[in-house]
Amino acid sequence: MQRREFLKLSTMLGATGVLPGLMGGCSARPLPGTGEVRTSPTVCNICFWQCAATLYTENRQPWKVVGNPHDPHCNGRLCTRGSGGIASYGDPDRLRHPLIRVDKNGKQSFRKATWDEAFDYISDKMQTIAERHGRDRIALFSHGDGGSHFQRMLQAFGSHAYAHPSFAQCRGPREVAFGLTFGEGVGSPDRTDMTKSRCIVLIGSHIGENLHNSQVQSLTEALDNGATLITVDPRFSVPASKSKHWLPVKPGTDLALLLAWMNVIINEDLHDRDYVARYCSGFEQLAAHVQPFNPEWAYLETGLEPDQIRTTARAMAQAAPATLIHPGRHVTWYGDDSQRCRAIAILNALLGSWGRPGGFYAQEKVDLPEYPAPKPPKPDRDWKADVQADYPLVSTGISNVLIDHSVGPDAFFKGWFVYATNLVTTIPGVRKQLEQAAQSLDLMVVIDTMPAEITGYADVVLPECTYLERHDDLRNKPERIPTLALRMPAFPPEFDSKPAWWIARGLAKKLDLGKYFPWQDYREVLDWQLRQVGSSLKEMEEIGVKTFPRKTPVYFDPLKPVTFNTPSGKIELYSPSLEQTGHDPLPKYTPPQRPPSGYFHLNYGRAAAHTFGRTINNPLLFELMPENCVWVHPSAAAGLGITSGQYVRLKNPEGAHSNRVRVRVTQRIRPDSVFLVHGFGHTDQRLRLARGVGADDAGLMHNVKIDPVMGGTGMRASFVTLVRKEA
Ligand code: SF4
């Protein structure tokens, strides 16, 4: 008998029936807008871009959600997913009640619990962990706006370890690389000044498929203004189709191309000499380093014609400094990702685009004071010294490293809180490790709005209400224009779901830590904060978004000296910090592994209708895109004897199979690669729309390369083949 069996929520909840409401097609309803209409401000939570919006209800039922026209972050527009977000409220598969794992006669299941029972169970386990192992042995994994409340509760308890998978499985390499080079990361939203760019280079970045709203708007505006778009991608993606130059690079060789571009720009004296002399250090070492990497060398690695490499390098230089080599967002690919992102940062520096119009602007947010509550005490010892000492250049948690330290009887971590992140599909190739962690952890709490595969490992599942039913912290992101935006409930929470602030506070009170949560209602916190900056909750409930004047310049002032937040105070083309920590101080190219015979590089990406696996079960978005398909080049398809529309399974060299997935034969992909949209292939039976449709790319990843600089998981080094399967 296992200590913690994987449980499918359906075994306890007995889900049956059909989906009401939003999937119901046409009926004899009155025309929209003819009933009692009310509006309330919100901030979209269907992805993490946080566009401000207005929710319309009619006769107290959800009607529509539209962009707030006063929000400079979204310009009054929502993307497809944001518009479909309203269906998350009525999703019949939502988590409804707290659940506690029980063991009856050797058989495990979940039982419905009250909040008080759930808090008692969790606090008892936390106290036991503290007594046996120490108060610092509980980790938080979080990917959502309410995570800060659980972070506060755990810090008050004595556990400070937290990780956002958005670092080690997504943006981490570029944040570390840009931090090493410029002394600051790119941040989120990205500080890219695309509307003013005259040349934009996208490397494996799918803006337009990845619908980060304002980025798509900025790219579109730049193209309307005549900007040159260069797209580097093994696949003819949507942005590739808008590009002047499409470079179908061999997977894994992007860094070879970047080195060749630097070679051309330096050797043809196309770099911004004044900018480099004024702001940068290490140019001589860089110039010597790139000498061997001419376009002819790069041709053998990348498969790209030397002429095309030279032409595109010159196009970038011609438009500089209004040239943006886009840093990308999901950049954990091949394990040398920090080095590739360093090469992108260096190339931008050579062209003088950091701090200049059309390149990267300086972000600013509202100086919003913290509510006057006691601060959790600082720990005597930093948990990172015990868990991730191998990554001294990283200041945040590395999710996969925290999981490594949760397996086995002597593991550091004994308890987990998992908030709004389905670790099963977020961390590549992690299933076996999660099963092992589930056997050795003393507590696992999962908090989410929807069932997901991770809930199958939980001791306790806590249902959060949707973003349409709750207050969260004010949106206060570093941006071009400082703004605050309010998310407030349009409906009371359905079923027995609760907002994150309520859950964290309730648990803190049970742990005798209530003094760290001195408010009765989160409205008190929001109103107090807003009053410190000349507004109020009442005002924000009416307007939703408020803008504030900037206090700092958007770009460098050429008449003033600039000191960068690096050890030398300069932009560090050559990185002494990397050298001191045993890494290459200048980007070093390592040729990638090639697929075994009969296998293909597994590429994955996003689609306009979905955000990872989080939205597949959303009835409106499911209707738009109910399954993914696998892209295959015609020559590869002919070799395998498969045709478009046929179902296959994907298999990796270790024998792992996907669900059945439909084939799309297309010339829009290199013959050595296949492509999937990420997020499909759910197995949780409670997700009545999403279960069993499409293929899960994360479950096929077998060759996960760890970045030695920042510990992230390189997720594009895996291979698959296609196995015929009748529909
Ligand atoms: Fe919502 Fe789309 Fe904005 Fe994301 S980009 S917050 S899904 S509207």
Image: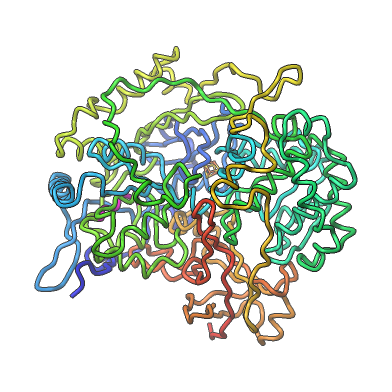
- Which residue is nearer to you in this view: 455 or 167? 167
The answer to whether residue 121 is above or below residue 77 is: below
Q: How many marks?
A: 0
Image location of residue 271, percent across then percent down:
83, 39
**Quadrant in the picture for residue 63:** top left
Q: Is residue 192 left or right of residue 43?
A: right
Identified at 53% across, 54% down, the residue is: 610
- Which residue is nearer to you in this view: 304 or 30? 304
Identified at 25% across, 66% down, the residue is: 439
The quadrant of the image that shows the N terminus is bottom left
Q: Which residues are magenta?
A: 444-449
The answer to whether residue 398 is above or below residue 366 is: below
What is the chief secondary structure element of the magenta stretch? Answer: strand
Image location of residue 86, percent across then percent down:
45, 44
**Quadrant in the picture for residue 11:** bottom left
Q: Decide whether residue 445 is among the magenta residues.
A: yes
Image location of residue 135, percent across then percent down:
21, 44
Q: How is the image coloured?
A: rainbow
Identified at 63% across, 29% down, the residue is: 569
- Which residue is nearer to you in this view: 489 or 60? 489
Q: Decide whether residue 403 is among the magenta residues.
A: no
Image location of residue 578, percent across then percent down:
59, 46
Q: Is residue 241 left or right of residue 394?
A: right
Q: Is residue 431 left or right of residue 169?
A: left
